[in-house]
Image (cartoon, grey):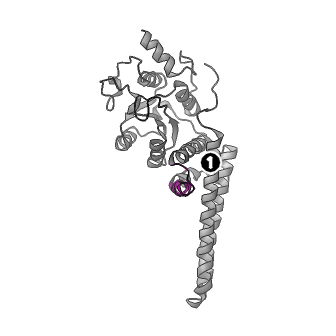
Amino acid sequence: MKPLQPDSTYTRARKRLFIGLISATSLVVIVICGLLWIIPYIGLQSIHPAAPLFFAVLFGAAILFTLWAWLSLLANIHLGRPVLFSKRMRGLTIKIFLPLMTLLGRLAGISKEDIRHSFIKVNNELVRAENRRYPGEKILLLMPHCLQSSRCDMRLTYDIDNCRRCGKCPIKILLDIRDKHGVHVAIATGGTIARRIVVQTRPKLIIAVACERDLASGIQDTYPIPVYGILNERPHGPCLDTLVQRSSLEEALALFLETPLHDSGVDSVEDFSREQQTASAN
């Protein structure tokens, strides 16, 4: 198997966008906290002599917390490992910073898709930085239903083994990977079914394939379960006959599986298109 290559789907510009937005968001929070401190400080003495000191401590703590979260997250991204007790940075990023970043980005004219793309990139780095590995049965490959060929009449949502493995869509690749590495594979048609699958399989790690919108919302919905996101390819537009490279899935598994990957018999950088051509020729 060829050496695994760095993820080439994302660009450095995506990371810079995330760093820029989270820095701007943190500064806005700090300025708001400062104003909320200064403004009451002017008149609170007339209510109680200790009121200004109380609010000074309260908002000072909020400012220090924001500074710690901001700087430790940047250090985490730069060094690729948790620093300054920042293991919970992924949760803060998901729950607090992403909504604020999205709001600030919209005010700055940045598209939601670009913000979500950047968020997924950084979330993946934070998940990798935890440096944890799992047995195959604790990993769930969660796939969108649009990976299935639109011309296929088999129902795979509730039982992926209904697939005939004809090779005309990426589902055959997923089943091959499942059989080889013992991971779970499931197809979801929406957020409700995805949550049901997660509850049933109880994974320790999810490797999810979807578009920017579904990945970002899925990462938020399933926290604190770590989700490593892979964007699907959409040669026919959204939600129709989408693709995922086998190499992308194997690279992700190589990061988290306890047992090292062995040669799967298919070149790790061979993409679905080549397998599809072979299937069509047959």
| Residue visible at 58% across and 90% down in the picture | 46
Judging by the rendered image, the residue that carries numbered circle 1 is 17
Residue with the most extreme front position: 109
Circle count: 1
Q: Quadrant of residue 168?
A: top left
Front-most of residues 214 and 47: 214
- Magenta-tinted stretch: 95-111
Residue 241: in magenta span: no
**x, y percent for residue 268:** 57, 21
| Residue visible at 44% across and 22% down in the picture | 179
Left or right of residue 242: residue 252? right
**x, y percent for residue 26:** 62, 60
Front-most of residues 137 and 141: 141
Front-most of residues 225 and 56: 56
Left or right of residue 6: residue 141? left
Residue with the most extreme top position: 282
| Residue visible at 30% across and 28% down in the picture | 155
In this view, 149 is above or below 71 = above
Give the SS element for disc 1.
helix
Q: What's the residue type where badge 1 is placed?
A: Leu
Front-most of residues 102 and 42: 102
Residue 51, visible in the rendered structure: yes
